[in-house]
Amino acid sequence: MDRLKKKKMADDKGLWQEGSIGDLLSVGLCILAMLSVMMAFMDCASLVHKKTIISQLARTYILRMETVGYLTEADESELVARLSEQGMQDIDLTGTTREVVGYGGEIVLKIKGKIGDGHVVEEKRMSTAKN
């Protein structure tokens, strides 16, 4: 009886409201949907960040290549190691200039590999030196 009195008093003050599980269910579904969208965004942002780092590494090594004239074996192994640190797998440098190029010649750095869940990343840099 005491409980009914409290409920009656709460009803009079507007504090007690009858609701259904449907109201709670819709709020829960909205929260779940927002959480899944946020997780997808974070995954995409992570991939973009890794691609940016790979692009910066490519820039660094194409500048080294312009100085030397090609990609040296030491630079190649260092580049592969740094790309691996960023989570890149199946690294392929086919098409990269690996022999000495004369002054004013075209120098190319091609990086291809996979990051994350098999997302293919390709980065191609060419020498910006003028003839």
Image: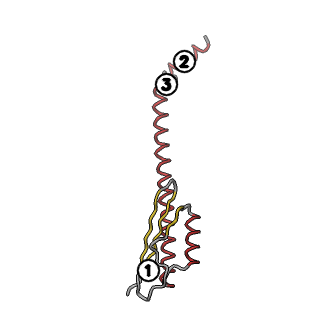
Query: Residue 21 got which mark?
Result: 3
Q: Tell me the CA gap for discs 2 and 1.
A: 84 Å
Asked whether 14 or 113 is in front, the reply is: 113
**Total numbered badges shown on the rendered structure:** 3
Residue sitting at 47 percent across and 23 percent down? 20
Q: In this rendering, is residue 13 above or below 111?
A: above
Most extreme residue toward the bottom is 103
Q: For label 2, count other residues whose C-alpha is less than 10 Å away and answer few (under 14), some (14-19) or many (20+).
A: few
Secondary structure found at label 2: helix
Amino acid type assigned to the residue bearing label 3 in the image: Ile
User: Between disc 2 and disc 1, whose residue precedes?
Assistant: 2
Residue sitting at 54 percent across and 61 percent down? 89
Residue marked by disc 2: 9
- Mark in front: 2 vs 1: 1
Most extreme residue toward the left is 131
**Where residue 80 sits in the image (x, y, percent)?**
56, 69
Query: Residue 75 got which mark?
Result: none
**Where residue 108 sits in the image (x, y, percent)?**
44, 76
Q: In this rendering, is residue 96 above or below 43?
A: below
User: Between disc 3 and disc 1, whose residue precedes?
Assistant: 3
- Quadrant position of the C terminus in the picture: bottom left
Residues marked 2 and 1 touching at CB (< 8 Å): no
Query: Residue 107 got which mark?
Result: 1
